[in-house]
Amino acid sequence: YSLSGPMVPASLTLALSLLLLAFTSVMAFVSAPPPPRHANHATTQPTVLHARKGRKSQKGFGRKQAEIEPTTNKSIYSLPALYDLAFGYRSYDDEVDFLLHVHEQYSSTKSPPKHILELAAGPARHSLTALSSKDLSVESATAVDVSPEMKDYASQLAKEQLLNQNLFQYICGDMRQPLDSSQKFDSAWILLGSLQHLQTNYDVISCFESAHEALKPGGTLIVELPHPRETFSMVECTKNGWEVPLEDETGQECGELRIVWGDETDTFDPITQVRQFTVSFDLTGVDEKQKQNVRQVVPMRLYTAQEIDALARCSGFEVVARYGALDKDVDVNDEDEAFRLVCVLRKV
């Protein structure tokens, strides 16, 4: 609807425009999509913190403790425990149920996946959740990430969560390269928008071809990305963020982790579809030595559904389904509920 014209006073036009702009900015802040990962190195003595129990934003994270390491001038990806806390709001149990369900529905075998491959896995929460599932259909999970720090962190989680650690393997590697393993997998996952780190078609095709090689015939590759609506509605970059309340090992409230993923000062290149995301983690309300403020710029590509379809076809896949979230009840075209682009690719 136009806010200008002979029937609308200029003062009302200005007021409505400012109200609309304010509403858009607020909604962008509270509904920020979950981002990807990378990693570097961090050393120092940890303090044990975990996400505050009972908060809606922490669904699926529970009271799992994370060792927060004091640091300054570090990359957000060099702090696996801090990164893990930041995305503790994800409901891993529900998301894994969805991933297992859509594989069974769309794979050529029409059976639950037994062997899982998680690419750009970070802390590998989805793989570990799949192995801990009551479903018991998953017999093994392999996580791949370029970061040895993420590997060390996830390996420690596996020791704490899995009765049989031999079911879990973590490989330090680039998801664009063929997997250094002879095992074949039923389903591969690229989640939390991690594909956005691949900014060229060549890199994406390399990644998809590597996944294709690792999958069994008729296997699935499930990719989670921001919804294309975010790209096509972008008049200017907006600030996105969320907060994670924390408590210590005794259950006492102990600070807050504030995450910003994207700021108004970010630049977006419409030719390459790459946005320079300003990302920051701000840990406050804790011991003075544990306070952290980590900030950096992360370039990430925004994808359309048509692009994923074309890149899949170039790599030996077909897109067999799309969802608007890691939830089978959210249609990708749902203007109210859809906030992610989840593509189910099948090996052909």
Image (cartoon, rainbow, N blue to C red):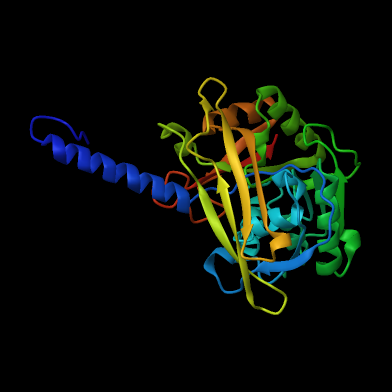
Residue 117 is situated, as x and y percent measured from the top left of the image, at 78, 47
Residue 338 is situated, as x and y percent measured from the top left of the image, at 46, 48
Residue shown at 68%/52% (left/top)? 110
Q: Is residue 198 above or below residue 326?
A: above
Question: Can see residue 123?
Answer: no
Q: Is residue 343 above or below residue 311?
A: below
Residue shown at 61%/57% (left/top)? 98
Q: Quadrant of the C terminus?
A: top right
Residue shown at 33%/42% (left/top)? 21
240 sits left or right of 139 in the view: left
23 sits left or right of 107 in the view: left
Of residues 280 and 317, the one drawn nearer to the viewer in this rendering: 280
- Which residue appears farthest toward the left when viewing the image? 7
Residue shown at 55%/63% (left/top)? 57
Among the 4 quarters of the image, the one containing residue 20: top left
Of residues 115 and 241, the one drawn nearer to the viewer in this rendering: 241
